[in-house]
Amino acid sequence: MEDESQKKIEKIQHCPECSSEHISKDYHRGELLCENCGLVLDDEYIDDGPEWRAFDAKQREKRARTGAPMNYLSHDKGLSTSISWKNKDAYGRTIPHKNRGQIYRVRKWHRRIRVSNATERNLATALRELDRLSSKMGLPRSIRETAAMIYRKAVEKNLIRGRSIETVIASSLYAGCRKCDVPRTLTEISDVAQADEKQIGRAYRFLSRELQLKLLPTRPENYIKRFCSKLDLGRNVVNKGEEIIEKANELGLTSGKGPTGIAAASIYISSILEGEPRTQRAIAEVAGVTEVTIRNRYKEIAEEIGITIET
């Protein structure tokens, strides 16, 4: 009965009256209703939450009857047990010296059986490399988990064969950044991964095609804030740069052009207009493009938009 009710609720994606997608759950009345027009979509909604209440984090942790969530950054998803390296028992008492050798052997075999086959060994090595790259680039946990899921799917479909772990991990991380809308350039990732940029790009295109990753093209405005931060530019330059890109998009000037080149040219124009000029060389080093690219792009944008740049 409960499963049927849950399936019925999952089918309700929007309000049939006003087509609104803002659907709320009223647990006290057992109703599913539309926040826009107030239509009651279901009056027999089952509360699937816990039957107990908690008033602080300690009480919530004590009353919960479930374990920790799955961790996709670990090869065993964090579902295995672990034996602490502290020589203490479950009650916090010190383990006698005569039993420490036995506990050491238990730890050693426990560590060995956690990685039982070639696939798990591959995942353990790859996910450690993923964590290292993410830490050096300062990427958040959401991107790490997205990249780990992409790599796991690649392993399941046997797409790793013939490619180095470093290259596939770097391409998975690049795909994860794009999927989470926090783009990083291939040059940045290849520098950190110490792998060939062309091989990473080739592996990324292969994974994207085989795993059917639906990734939208990177937008130039996604790079503006990060590049301006590295160039020590103010908020007014960021706003002006985003405004220039918006106008360039409306005129179709960004079509077929590299997003980093467009972003670099916009920053160059806005920095001059806002009285905080930066050289083309400085912007090119941060954006990972050539000075020629910046000159070509900024001339195209300035001419079409009608901005006069005094150099």
Image: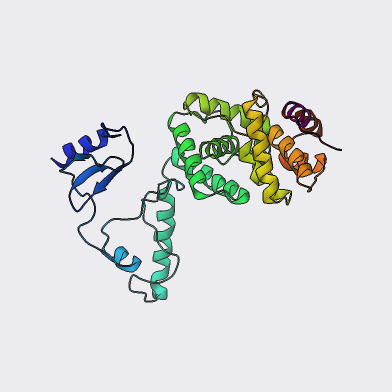
Residue 205 as seen in the image, left or right of residue 67: right
Where is residue 53? Give x, y as percent. Answer: 24, 63
Image side of residue 223 versus residue 231, left or right: left
Could you say which quadrant of the image residue 306 lies in?
top right
Residue 195 in sight here: no
Q: Quadrant of the N terminus?
A: top left
Residue at 19 percent across and 40 percent down: it is 42
Where are the magenta residues, as a range? 298-304
Q: Is residue 296 visible?
A: yes
Please state which of residues 113 and 97 is positioned toward the viewer in this rendering. Answer: 113
Give the number of callouts: 0
206 horizontally vs 251: left or right: left
Locate residue 15: give its quadrant: top left
Q: Position of residue 94 (x, y in %)?
A: 39, 76
Residue 40 position within the rendered picture, expressed as x and y whole percent measured from the top left: 20, 40
**Residue most extreme to the right:** 311
Where residue 101 sits: x, y (%)? Answer: 42, 67
Residue at 40 percent across and 47 percent down: it is 77
